[in-house]
Amino acid sequence: MARWGMVIDLDRCNGCQSCEVACRAENNVAVGGPVAARENRTVFWLRVLTEVHGEWPDVRTRFVPRPCMHCDRPPCTAVCPVGATTKDDEGIISQIYPRCIGCRYCANACPYTAKSFNWKRPNHPPSSLPMLNPDVSTRPVGVIEKCTFCHHRLQRAREQARAEGRPLRERDYVPACAESCPTGAIVFGDLDNPHHRVAELVHDPRAFRLLEELGTQPKVYYLAEEH
Amino acid sequence: MNDADKLAGLSQDERVLLAPLVRTTRWFWIWLAIMAAVTAWGAVAYVLQLRYGLGRTGLNTPEYWGIYIICFVFFIGISHAGTLISAILRISNAEWRRAITRSAEFITVLVIAFGAVQPVIDLGRPDRVLNVIVHGQAWSPLLWDVCSIGLYFTASSIYLYVPMIPDLARIRDLKIRPTWLYWFLAIGYEDTPRSREVLQRIIAVLAVVVIPIAVSVHTVIAWIFALTLRPMWHSTIFGPYFVVGAIYSGIAALIIAMAILRRVYRLGAYFKNVHFNNMGILMLVMALLWTYFTFAEYLTAWYGGEEAEMATFWSKVSGPYALPFWLMVVSCFVVPVALMCRSATRGVWGTTIASVFVVLGMWLERFNIVVPTSVHPRLEMPAAGYWPSWVELSIMAATFSGFILVYMVATKFFPIISLWEIQEGREESVQEVSERVASYLPDDVEVTSP
């Protein structure tokens, strides 16, 4: 059984946010706009966090792309009163939109603020409708949504592999963010498969995880900057 | 013969305590209309929220929980007034309880209902609330909460109803309207020594049973917060801290209710200075306990000095939430302790003023627990903040007015002071208490000369 995970090399990330854009397009994330931004209500499945260190002229900005961490010990799934957010056999944390009652307990329990709530009816302007991804359901108002590691791509890749009568290869299943990264900072794969790059990268001396000390065991690793 | 005439020839207790059932003043209708108007306004606000979603509130990311959850914790806290206080006083044979248990128990039952709907109002999808039963996930503290509040509501309703049966039977026999209501609720009770004895035994059992249920309710509410990894929520003392706060605010709410009832129904002869004095002493004890818990909580966070905890800590002590924080300290510690530690200020006015401060302060305490932690997630978000919208404030106002409304109506159908317990006190307790005191004294010892 695969255990899907991600390694993000912060040394390679230049903060271009193409992962964010690719994620929004791939997953039919609603258009936010200036009002939602002002109200802190924009939906993000993946958000590039920025940290500014120092003062002018010695300023350094660090970019940290933050998808869902897909924790092996997820604090969000335990607290959901209706089992609308669960961890599947391959370690992906999913959200069942038609079951979610919108209590936002999971969002409060998540130390990474990786969950977004639909405060208003999601905004899909008419011009964006032809570009919606048919593999991903849109969400109604009043439910939580989150990064799924582009779970639908796994289903498609698996069907393809089965049709061709071959096993699933590393290149078959890549989330939109990793695919779109121009510097190749985001690497995705099976953490338990020694032939996958991620399995090797997590042993890099630069590897760390966000808020590791909380014991949530995230499956998203970061490689620290070298300088 | 109208109902008022039926009271003419009765004893003082019956005349005074049943008067609200048969006579209604103009002021009652005026207040009823005001409360109904505020409640209706809140209902309109809720319809808007239903239509457009929680976007009508001031909530945002990461400020996921706001006024509704604050009110949920606050109102369930107030509900500890009744059942817990009345049960403790019954078990400890406190004779001064007789006049106040009924009004306390009514607060409990009515306020739980208003508290319990708050999380439903807070839901993004209230249409799916039954998923909690259909797809219930037993590991979720929210589900424990549904169970404990359901149990508490049931138990305290029974605990309100059973000790009321003799009064209901008496009202039935007096043929006060609506006769069918009292005939139905009195369930054929006849006041014989045998039935009185059975009733007393049931009440004794209930009083013991409701105490752990009441404690569990606010403990579980505390766990909703404490079982997450959020800074200043993830605390082992949250369970007892919430229970102490709940009893504290409950006592204050009960004192306010007693003061109002005393005035509007001219119950000065029943809610006497001694009752306010004793309740004031109880409130002083809870004030000191609450202060102790609060101090322990903040000292632990500050001394440990963990980065994530400190962001929340300083936002309360000297940051954007300093005003609600220090107002809370003044209203929950400075004012009540200053007023309640002197017997001169433990009269009706002193305890009532202190209680108003405590109720407001305890609302602020819930605010200070929910909001500052919410806006300080471990991974800092840019420019997080919270201003409640008029929709949230209207629904909160409607919750208060709705509670007052049903409480007012309840006093018009049920005697708000237990009639039979007062009469029992007059007939039996004086002798019983002197016998009890005599039994505490040393036995006679036969002196044998050496």
Image: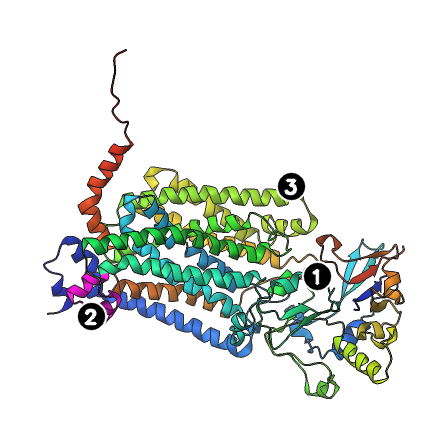
**Whole-percent x and y of residue B319?**
61, 51
Label 3: how many Cα within 10 Å (few below 14, some 14–19, many 20+): few
Q: Is residue A78 left or right of residue B71?
A: right
Residue type, numbered disc 2: Thr
Foreground tag (2 vs 1):
2
Distance CA(mark 2)–CA(mark 3)? 64 Å
- The answer to whether B325 is drawn above or below residue A190 in the figure is above
> Magenta stretch?
B168-188
Q: Quadrant of residue A135?
A: bottom right
For image coordinates 68% across by 52% down, the residue present is B308
- The answer to whether B105 is drawn above or below residue B95 in the figure is below
Label 1: how many Cα within 10 Å (few below 14, some 14–19, many 20+): some
Foreground tag (3 vs 1):
1
Q: Which residue, given by chain and number where applicable, does mark 2 sit on?
A: B179
Q: Is residue B428 left or right of residue A147?
A: left
Residue B11 magenta-highlighted: no
Q: Are marks 3 and 1 on the same chain?
A: no
Q: Which residue, given by chain and number where applicable, does mark 3 sit on?
A: B303
Q: Main secondary structure of the magenta part?
A: helix
Residue B386 numbered mark, or none: none
Distance CA(mark 3)–CA(mark 1)? 25 Å
Q: Quadrant of residue A34?
A: bottom right
Residue type, numbered disc 3: Tyr
Q: Which residue, given by chain and number where applicable, does mark 1 sit on?
A: A112
Foreground tag (2 vs 3):
2
Residue type, numbered disc 1: Tyr
For image coordinates 79% across by 82% down, the residue present is A159
Which of the two residues, A98 or B123, is positioned nearer the viewer here? A98
